[in-house]
Amino acid sequence: MHIEIQRKSETSLSKQIFQSIVDHIRSGLLLEGSQLPSVRELSKKLEVSFVTVVKAYKELEKENYIISIQGKGTFVNIGETDIRNSKTDEPPFNWQLSIQDYLPRAQFSRFHHIQGEIQLSSSMIDPGLLPNQYLEKEIHKMLSENPRILSRYSEIQGEYELREAMSNYLKQFAVPTTPENLLVTNGSQQGIDLIARTFIGPNDVVIMESPTYPGAIDIFRGRGATILTVPVDRDGMNLNILQNLCDKYKPKIIYTIPTFHNPTGVVMSQKRRRQILEIAKSIQCIIVEDDPWSEIYFDKKPPAPIKSMDNYGHVIYLKGLSKTLAPSCRIGILSASGSIFNRLLAAKSNADLGSPLLTQKSLLPFITSKKMIDHMKKLRTALKVRRDLSLELLSKYSPEGITWMIPNGGLNLWITLPIWIDTNQLLIEAKKNFVSFLPGSVCFPVEQEKCHLRLSFSFMSEQQLQQGIKTLCMIFNAEISSKKNNIPDF
C-alpha cells in the first residue's frame, strides 16, 4: 500500500493518511478483511509520529472503514464477527502484499461498468442509438477492399485523413486547429494520462472542479499531484476561489469540464471561460479542457470552448468520440500547440506507438459524411426524451429533501440527498434490487461528501429507466424514513 505524504500541504498528515487508506479501500486495492500495518509499522514507514497514525486510524474506525481487534490487529471492515472467527492460516496470495505498488487510487474503474440488470452507473449511450449497422458495413467494405490494413501500423500521431476530418469537424465548435496540431488517442482517458505523465510529478499542483470526473482524479493522484479543488455552481467553477488558489499555489494545470460538466451537468458561462483563460495566462499554466459531449445539447448550443479563445497555447483540448459513435473503437482527439504538443506526441510514442489503424479507418467515412450530422440530431432527441422521463419520475416518486440539477445536455443527473445519507450504503441496497448508480463520493478529489449520486439516463431503455428510478426512489424513501425514526427528540 503506497501512501504519498506531502509535508508542505496544508492538509494535516493524519488527514492525508486517512484519505489515502479510504481511496485504497474504495478502489478495491485494499480488499475487505485485509490487515493493515500496525500503528508502529506505519509511523516508521511514513516517518511520522505514532500519534499521527493513531489519529488517522481512529477516524477510519469512526467512519466504519476499518476495525481493530484486540490481539489480532487492524482490518478493512467486513464485520467484527467474521474477523474474530477467521482462521489463522494466511491465504496463499498474502505474500503479494509485501510488493510495493504506486497506485494511490483507482476508484473509477471499480464503478465504471457495474454489472446489474438496470445500469444507471456508467455514462454510456444505449447501443440501439448508435450507428452500428453503418459502421459494420464500412468495416466489411474496408477489409474487402484493403485486406492488408490489418498488417499495417498507424502513424504515431494518428492517420492524417482522420486528423484532417477532425480538424474540419472541430471548426463547428470554433476550435482553431490543423491536422498538424491534432493527436489521435485511445479515448479521452489516454489524453488525460498523456498530459499527466508529461507535465505532472510528485507535489505539482493541479486544480480541479469539485465534484469532477473520477477518471481524471485517479490519473492525477497516481502521479503524486497535490490536488486543490474549486466548487462548482450553476455557472461553473467559482472564480474567486480559483483566483485565490492560483495566486497562492501557482498550479501547473487547471482541469475543467466546462460544457455539460461531469457529473453535475452545469455549463460554464462564456464570461467565466474567458476569465479562466486570463488567469491561466497571468500565471503561465495549462488548462486541460475536457469536452466529452458538447454535441449533446437539449435546448440551445452551449458557448464555444475555452480553446476557441486561446491564442497563446495555454489550452489542451480533449474531444471524445467513443461514447457518441462507437465505444469499442476508443477514439479521442487531443488538440494543443507549440512545444506542449511536441512533448505530448513524444509521450504518445512512449505509451503505445500509435492508436490502432483499424478503428481510425472505421470511423473516418462516418465523420466525413452527412450521417454524422443526422446521427447527432437523432441522438439529442432520444436522450432529451430520457432526460425528461427521468426528471418526471424523480418529481413524482422521490421523497422530500432530495434535490437534483436539471442538465441542458450530456448524459447524467446529479442528485443530492440529505447530508446524513451515505450513497455508498444505498448502492449496496440498490444492487440487491439489480440497480446500479455512481456514488458521488467517487467524484470528489479531496472532500468526503457522501450524500450525492450520479444517475446516467443514457444507457437504459425508457422502460428500464422507469423501473430503475422507481426502485431507487423506493430505497430513498425507506432510508430517509429509517434515519428520521432513529433521530432522538430533544
Image: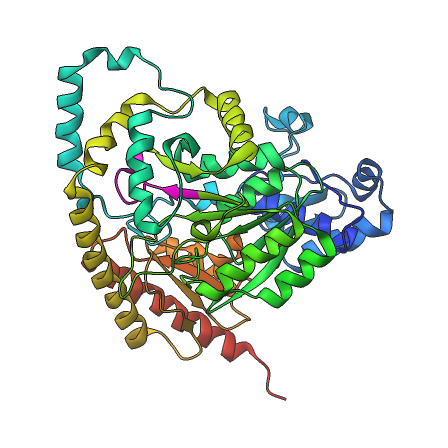
Q: Residue at x 17, y 18 (%)?
A: 143
- Tell me, yes or no, if residue 445 can be seen here: no
* Nearest the eye: 445 or 204: 204
* Quadrant location of the N terminus in the rendered image: top right
Q: Quadrant of residue 38?
A: top right
Number of numbered discs on residues: 0
* Nearest the eye: 84 or 274: 274
- Residue extending furthest front? 311
Q: Is residue 481 above or below residue 51?
A: below
* Nearest the eye: 267 or 25: 267
**Residue 321 in magenta?**
yes
Q: Quadrant of residue 252?
A: top right
Q: As drawn, is 193 to the left or to the right of 114?
A: right
- Tell me, yes or no, if residue 375 can be seen here: yes
**Residue 82 in magenta?**
no
Q: Is residue 483 above or below residue 232?
A: below
Give the percent coordinates (x, y) of residue 330: 35, 34
Q: As drawn, is 307 to the left or to the right of 150?
A: right
Magenta stretch bounds: 318-328
* Quadrant location of the C terminus in the rendered image: bottom right
Give the percent coordinates (x, y) of residue 479: 45, 70
Q: Is residue 193 above or below residue 452?
A: above
Q: Residue at x 80, y 36 (%)?
A: 45
* Nearest the eye: 172 or 146: 172
Q: Residue at x 24, y 48 (%)?
A: 126
Give the percent coordinates (x, y) of residue 331: 35, 34
Q: How is the image coloured?
A: rainbow
Q: Is residue 478 above or below residue 74?
A: below
Give the percent coordinates (x, y) of residue 54: 80, 51
Q: Residue at x 42, y 51 (%)?
A: 308
